[in-house]
Amino acid sequence: MIYEMRVCRCLPGRMPALLKRFEDVTLALWKRHGVEPAGFWTVEVGESNLDLVYLLRWNSMGERETKWAAFATDPEWVAKRIESERDGPILANITNSFLKPTAFSTVK
């Protein structure tokens, strides 16, 4: 199992728009494409309260590449993403890391 940690840094004042897009659009499309989220967090105390941090669970990098490409090019996603940004961009940037559980991790 591989976990992908993604950190979405919002532009100031745009976190509500990002959370709404996840709740109303992204999660349903991920489900359709077999993308499995493992958790979501906002930063209460830390470097930036403009960050949404989430983990995605993958069986392999090959699975990730196939499913993520299908999601990213889904015409509904492309249209809804554009629509959600009609009041301006939401994100400053996105970073990601791929995490592999250790032998002693409680999360496998």
Image: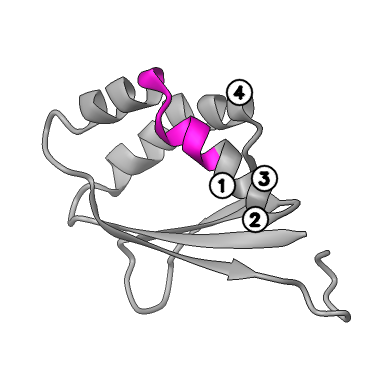
Q: Are marks 3 and 2 in contact (CB under 8 Å)?
A: yes
Quarter assignment of residue 90: top left
Q: Is residue 90 left or right of residue 64?
A: left
Marks 3 and 2, how far apart at CA: 5 Å
Q: Secondary structure at mark 1?
A: helix
Residue 92: assigned label: none
Q: Label 4 to label 2, Cα distance in Å? A: 19 Å
Image spot of residue 92 (x, y percent): 21, 57
How far is disc 4 from disc 3 in space, using C-alphas? 14 Å
Relative to 3, is 68 on the left or the right?
A: left
Residue type at mark 3? Answer: Glu
Residue bearing mark 1: 65
Callout 4 amino acid: Arg
Mark 3, residue position: 63
Q: Residue at the location (85% across, 71% down)?
A: 106
Q: Residues within 10 Å of mark 3 (few under 14, many from 20)?
A: few
- Do labels 1 and 3 touch, CB within 8 Å? yes
Residue at image coords 68%, 52%:
57
Q: Residues within 10 Å of mark 1 (few under 14, many from 20)?
A: few
Look at the numbered discs 1 and 4 and tell me whether their residues touch, using CB distance below 8 Å. no
Kindly identify the amino acid type of the residue bearing the numbered disc 2.
Met
Q: Are marks 4 and 2 in contact (CB under 8 Å)?
A: no
Question: Which mark is first along the chain, 3 or 4?
Answer: 4
Disc 4 crowd rating (10 Å Cα; few below 14, some 14-19, many 20+) is: few
Residue 88 relative to residue 49: left or right? left
Q: Can you identify the residue that label 4 sits on?
A: 32
Q: Nearer the viewer, mark 4 or mark 3?
A: 3
Write down the region rendered in magenta.
Answer: 68-76
- Give the SS element for disc 3: helix
Q: Which residue is mark 2?
A: 61
Q: Spatial distance from mark 1 to mark 4, Cα to Cα?
A: 16 Å
